[in-house]
Image: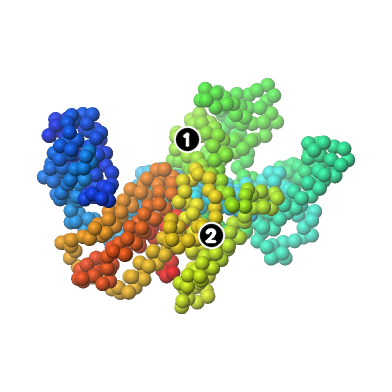
Amino acid sequence: MNLQETLSNTVKQAVKSVFNAELESVEFQATRKEFAGDITVVVFPMLRIVKGNPVQIGEQIGQYLVENVKEVKAFNVVKGFLNIEISDAYYMAFFNEIKENMSYGFAEPNSKDKAVMVEYSSPNTNKPLHLGHIRNVILGYSVAEILKASGKKVYKTQIINDRGIHICKSMLAWKRFGNGETPESSGLKGDKLVGNYYVKFDQEYKKEIKTLISEGQTEEEAKKNAPMLIEAQEMLRKWESGDEEVVALWTMMNGWVYDGFDITYKNIGVDFDTLYYESQTYLLGKEFIAEGLKTGVFLKKEDGSVWCDLTEEGLDEKIVLRSDGTAVYMTQDIGTAIQRVKDFPDIGGMVYTVGNEQEYHFQVLFLIIKKLGFDWAENLYHLSYGMVDLPSGKMKSREGTVVDADDLVIEMAQTAGEISEELGKLDGYSEEEKQELYKTIGLGALKYFILKVDPRKRILFDPKESIDFQGNTGPFIQYTYARIQSILRKAQSTSHTVDVTELELHTKEKELLKHLELFPEVVQNAADHYSPALIANYTYDLVKEFNSFYQNVSILGADTDTEKVFRVQLSNAVANVIKNAFGLLGIDVPERM
């Protein structure tokens, strides 16, 4: 039982003993800085069942706590707020428990719990990853890591959209204009090369439309009749019928893209446990549609199309099979979800990291799976997120106006380098060490800027603003971690044991310990709400608290050896939590900066 639970139970006992009343719950909050105390009981909600003056009620409960809870050493009441002071001994006991625990804050996995599968990235194989994908990848990876830290078993996955008309557009443009160009001959990453041909298709298609309009067709007619589009549609039909030449071209170009994606994922620092491909899953789900027709989950219309009527649930009718029997995205998603549980029988829920424009799609998907009778449908979650904008405006892949993910990572490292050089912080570094550090700072800045914001909010991303060594930024937190490492190096060996149980804590030391104590609860809350922002902002608050401690308390120049050892070990515990928290965000922390 933690301290807050002990206090809660004892406050309820006090109300029962002193006022002969039953209190259902106790409201706590952090004690305001201007008052003495570590935790505050809010008395006002009790007035519904305990009649009287809130100050007198607070005084009586406070006295009861002092007499019955050994950790409570004093109290004061301000209006309807009972401020409780906790003994230093309690915080020292807590510190001794965690100071050598490198995985402090992380829960042990429970073998009885069902696993969670987290899907993220899920790109198309006709273009490289861009800034929009970066938010998806960083967010999904971080949520997977946070769920793991909360004690869940997690599988990280993506479904690669490797089929369809958009893929055929790149293939056709390469076939027409590529002259046998390859990643090796061009020196380009495979995904960039294929993306260039997707842009090329759009350019040539627009020329054809213009020509057809000049010959008297309407714009709508020209778009349908452009030879490029007709040929791409024919290529898709050939792919679906297994044409050897088209399938061979598709296999070769997709292979280029996968090699390119692997490099990007490595550069960003994310990974996957398993992959699914749309070419292998797009026919899945049809058997479940047939089953659902028998049980009345779906209905067939006169033209042969199959629908699910969700009007009673406040939604509309949703098509799940076209009249010609072909699958739609919904069919595929139903089948893929069920297939995943077949592949990994210990899955009890899934998290889909997909932009907020797909919210309705997932409402429908989850409801249909539930209607099909799968109990794990209760544990499906759409991790919906807002778009990422740039100061220059919106991005369009087919027009080649996207911010390429690889280019952005490089740009972030360059910007970090420029700022670091200006600040003159890197004397004595080799060029190789500098480049590695710039990448760590740049990538940390990018990830932190994105993850510190609630996932549902739209972001305006400014690379320069994100790389600031002051304020709520990744580099500021990384710099504090590096500062602590510098202190630890200067302190040399402080691992020897000293008796700190009788040590009287400085206010700044106590504040730091109180903040460290919150970390496990923050991890659980972040997992419950699928929100890396809770981890990011907790870490920023911890770092601010440490910097205040650093400025007000001498660490290496402490008056006694006992104080010095304690403060160095306390600094080390803070560094460990920063490292653990940033690890959950997928961010590295440098030993020196």
Left or right: 477 in relation to 232: left
Where residue 12 appears, x then y in whole percent? 19, 36
Residue under pointer 2: 464
User: Can residue 269 be seen at all in this image of the molecule?
Assistant: no
Q: Under tag 1, what secondary structure? A: helix
Amino acid at circle 1: Ala
- Residue 516: in sight, yes or no? yes
Depth check, mark 1 against mark 2: the one in front is 2
Q: Nearer the viewer, residue 512 or 171?
A: 512
| Rendered location of residue 175, percent (x, y) | 78, 54
Contact between labelled residues 2 and 1, with CB atoms less than 8 Å apart: no
The residue depicted at 47 percent of the width and 38 percent of the height is 380
Residue hosting label 1? 377
Cα separation, mark 1 vs mark 2, equals 43 Å
Kindly identify the residue that appears in the image at 36 percent across and 47 percent down: 524
Q: Based on the displayed image, in which of its 4 quarters is residue 102 positioned?
A: bottom left
Mark 1 Cα shell of 10 Å, populated few (<14), some (14-19), many (≥20): many
- Total residue callouts: 2
Tell me which corner region of the image, top left, top right, bottom left or bottom right, holds residue 346. Answer: top left
Mark 1 vs mark 2: which is more N-terminal? 1
Above or below, comparing residue 78 to residue 569 in the picture: above
- 154 vs 445: above or below: above
The colour scheme applied to this rendered structure is: rainbow
**Percent of width and height locating residue 418:** 54, 68
Query: What amino acid type is highlighted by mark number 2?
Result: Lys
Q: Secondary structure at mark 2?
A: helix
Who is closer to the viewer here, 264 or 397? Answer: 397
Residue drawn at x 27%, y 59% is 508
542 vs 199, left or right, is left
